[in-house]
Image (spheres, rainbow, N blue to C red):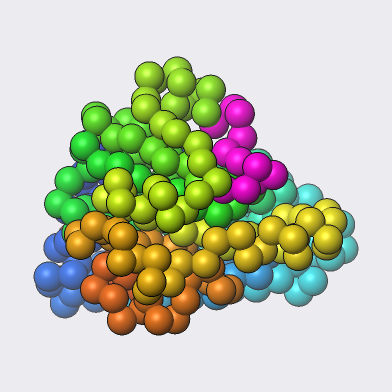
Amino acid sequence: MRSLIDILELSLEEIDQLIATAEDIIAHPEKYRESCKYKKLATLFFEPSTRTRLSFEAAMHELGGQVLSVSSAGSSSAAKGESIADTAKTVSCYADIIAMRHPKEGAPMVAAMNASIPVINAGDGGHNHPTQTLADLLTIWREKGRFTGLTIGLCGDLKFGRTVHSLIAAMARYTGNKFVLISPEELKLPSYVKKDILQKNGIEYVQTTDLESALPALDVLYMTRVQQERFFNEEDYLRLKDSYILTPEKLEKANKDLKILHPLPRVNEISVGVDADPRACYFKQVLNGKYMRMALILKLLEVEV
């Protein structure tokens, strides 16, 4: 039995296999419609979510399975003080696989250590979000056709952005990639990510506060929102929340084959005027997330189609 807590737990070969499965699901959805019949996914979300929770649930339904759902801590026994370990052991009696989101870093790992079924980390605090990274990887693959030799700009909240941390970890494993880290001083990429991933592997990166000057060099731009829920101080959030707003005017300086990604939800960091630009890929990214979660569920449940 295997869980997925961190994107680095997947080898490059396994990521290739998941992408191949996702591509096959896109091409031949009818092959997969009953592949998880009689299987149950439990979605344990102790933090608000629209895309990730519905994406997991849609993925399981499209595989012919069923879903058991906890959509907030207040509606679960966590409100009574039940531990993550006990919750995981209990839910293992009802379901075949768990997708868990939790505000505390490490909670899905604790669940995986105590569950008798696979656990998928659907986001833990500011730490990791491996299935969003799988969605990002499929989008980059389908839009750029490669994972190597790319200049990737990451813009916005690089300090608390778990999607950013996971994507850097994933793309750092491929050769020739460069990173442009665009953020306010207060929201710079944590030093442990720079040290353990970028510097340790000799990967080229630059840090800047200026989005517009960085745009012309980028193959991929990964925008993120400044996350109000990660701030202890409302004044800091209000001061930083509109640090970067991507507009059609700013994109005039960008490459014609730039691909714009965003893990969503967006607040106002991408103008709705950008949505019609062929370079905007964030809603394709949402759909790709469902396909990659389908592929991952099949892999962890060891279902052969």
- Residue at 31 percent across and 60 percent down: it is 253
Residue 143 drawn above or below residue 290: above
Image quarter (top left, top right, bottom left or bottom right) of the N terminus: top left
Where in the figure is residue 250, as x and y percent of width and height? Answer: 39, 65
In the rendered image, the residue lying farthest to the right is 80
Q: Is residue 201 left or right of residue 113?
A: left
As rendered, which of 133 and 106 lies closer to the eye?
133
- Residue at 62 percent across and 48 percent down: it is 184
Residue 187 magenta-drawn?
yes
Where in the figure is residue 236, as x and y percent of width and height? Answer: 79, 56
Image quarter (top left, top right, bottom left or bottom right) of the C terminus: bottom left
Where in the figure is residue 270, as x and y percent of width and height? Answer: 47, 71
**What span is in magenta?**
183-193
Residue 257 drawn above or below residue 74: above
Residue 227 magenta-drawn?
no
Residue 136 drawn above or below residue 275: above
As rendered, which of 41 and 188 lies closer to the eye?
188
Q: Is residue 169 left or right of residue 234?
A: left
As rendered, which of 181 and 94 lies closer to the eye?
181
- Residue at 18 percent across and 74 percent down: it is 29
Rendered image quadrant of residue 295: bottom left
The reply to whether residue 115 is in sight is no
